[in-house]
Amino acid sequence: MIDPEALRTWMVDYICSVLSLEKATFSTTATFDSYGLDSVEAVLMAGVMEEEFGVQVDPARMFEAPSVDQFVALMTGTDAAALSTPEA
């Protein structure tokens, strides 16, 4: 089982790194496309995530759950609302 917070942190770090975004302003409830994460990058991220966490990741699931919190909830069986933290 993947730790929800570990996956959430990893995803934020990865997306901010590849898209040159500031972590301080990154919202885990915003949709991937609002940040410019396209299907090509989603496939790449899924591959890296598989290696990092040792699980199989279908990139299509990122479109079923199109935000970090929604995707983490889908992958870990947790409640997306419980993952969200208030914006600073």
Image (tube, rainbow, N blue to C red):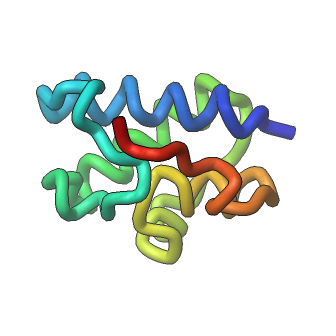
Total numbered labels: 0
Q: Is residue 24 above or below residue 73?
A: above
Up/down of 38 relative to 66, above or below: above
Observer-nearest residue: 56 or 35? 35
Q: Quadrant of the C terminus?
A: top left
**Nearest to the observer: residue 47 or residue 61:** 61
State which quadrant residue 38 falls in: bottom left
The residue at the point 36 percent across, 28 percent down is 14
Quadrant where the N terminus sits is: top right
Q: Position of residue 86 (x, y in %)?
A: 47, 46
Return the residue found at the far bottom. 64
Taking the image as shown, residue 59 lies to the left or right of residue 26, namely: right
The answer to whether residue 49 is left or right of residue 76 is: left
* Residue 61 to residue 8: above or below: below
Q: Is residue 5 left or right of residue 20?
A: right
Which residue is rendered at x = 77% and y = 51% of the image?
76
Q: Position of residue 77 (x, y in %)?
A: 81, 59
- x and y, in percent, of residue 67 in the image: 42, 60
Which image quarter: residue 13? Answer: top left
- Residue 20: image x %, image y %? 12, 27
Quarter of the figure with residue 75: bottom right
Q: Residue at x 54, y 54 (%)?
A: 69
